[in-house]
Amino acid sequence: MLLEKNKKVPLFVMILLILLILAGCGNRTPEISDTGVTRQDSEVYSFDKKETADTERIAEILNDIYEEAVNTPSGHSSMAYGDQEETNILGSPDILRRMVAGLGENGYVAVDGGNQIDMTQAEQALAFCRSVDEKERDELTIIVVMEMGIRQFDLKTEDGNVTIVRGYYQYDQNGSLQNRSTVSYPADFWQYTEEGYLIFGGSYVSDESYILTLSDTPEHTMLRILPLDEKCREYNRKYILPVGYEQNNLFLCNWSEDDFGDLDFYDLFDRFYPVMYSQPAPYMADENLGVGAVYQIPEELFENVIGAYFNMDYETLRSKTTYIPELAAYEYRPRGFHEAEYPDIAYPEVVNYRENEDGTVTLHVNAVYPGGNMSKEFSHTTVIRPFSEGSFQYVSNEIILPEGEHDIWWHSNRLTEEERETLFPKEVYGGA
């Protein structure tokens, strides 16, 4: 399903906003009151003593872990979500996991913001979902732990309808949780998916947003309730998440060691170079978008990076790239403006695996897209070949699209030579 993006704001709305600001009667940025409730929300929600006590209790549970994190020097970490296991920096998987576990031990339903850690007290969330289905009265609080604070969702249901109060709390300089915003809205979308995700959303009144868009502010949330096999999470952290679906097609097309298909090895060079050398690739786009940067990457460097992750001969690699024999180099152009991708994309989640007799591992992966309220936008099976020393190779990928029309709309291929010549005058790519 192709989603409509980048809606333009009507000109008269912008003029209206400017006039209101100049007149001094426009709605300013919401002020945070002593209770932490934004001005536009004060009519629909107010704090009571119970919630204040809950917030203080949550802060008390998290305080020691927070203090340890902010006072521990950060160590080196790679691109993978879970490769920071040995560091205690705030926002690292280890710290988030300990925070979620601490809340769970004290009876709270808790999960991390990236759905990479199993929800604690998940049976409470499942019971609430049953109450919604059976149109019973029920209440539930879910704490979502993030790097700089928490989100707290207070849910109530009656007659199959759900109302949500969402508070956002951020750590201040003293490590205390301070309320930055609180909104309340009825759920106009509620779904518990067969993949184990709870998805809900609605709209609330925000004066600033209404001036710009003439509509309420939408909000949607997607939380994994069902746990995942820890081995699935380990495989995901090590082999799938570091590459993901952004600016590469490793998991977005069919290929194998017998036929590498449409794999873009330039994008993969961009992904793997920082992992191998612990620094960004030096082949950057020109600061002037009107100038097309062109580089010649020494063959030894390019082939070492790609060869570390694929079992392929160099002749095959050279046939799928622009290789310059007289320079013993690969011609390389960084992605430019016309090759940019939309940032709101799906993330991969390994949901099953099979360890094969030949030493390879077949991973079954779902593409989870919170922006589209989809716990499985598409699936793919990826085969990897791990080695004893910790290195590995990608062996194949097979993408499984749902029935009907489907478009992985966020992905943009690099321009072909013909497309480049059509879009740009020859002098734009005059040389490195």
Image (cartoon, grey):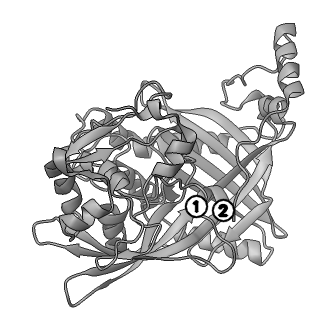
Q: Secondary structure at mark 1?
A: strand
Q: Residues within 10 Å of mark 2 (few under 14, many from 20)?
A: many
Name the quarter where the N terminus is drawn: bottom right
Task: In this rendered view, identify the residue nearer to me: 410 or 298.
Answer: 298
Residue 310 in picture, x, y percent from top left:
24, 67
Name the quarter where the C terminus is drawn: top left
Q: Quadrant of residue 76?
A: top left
Residue 120 in picture, x, y percent from top left:
47, 64
* Contact check, label 1 and label 2, Cβ < 8 Å: yes
Point 19% across, 69% down: residue:
313
From this view, report whether residue 160 is shown above or below residue 33.
below
Disc 1 marks a residue whose amino acid type is Tyr
Point 21% across, 66% down: residue:
315
From this view, report whether residue 133 is shown above or below residue 269.
below
Q: Secondary structure at mark 2?
A: loop
Task: In this rendered view, identify the residue nearer to me: 47 or 247.
Answer: 247
Q: Residues within 10 Å of mark 1 (few under 14, many from 20)?
A: some
Measured in 3D between alpha carbons, the distance from the residue under mark 1 to the one under mark 2, in whole angstroms, is 6 Å
Going by the image, does 310 lie left or right of 237? left
Residue 278 in picture, x, y percent from top left:
21, 43
Residue found at the very far top of the displayed protein? 23
Q: Quadrant of residue 410?
A: bottom right
| Residue placed under numbered mark 1 in the picture | 369
| Residue placed under numbered mark 2 in the picture | 373
Task: In this rendered view, identify the residue nearer to me: 201 or 170.
Answer: 201
Point 63% across, 74% down: residue:
193
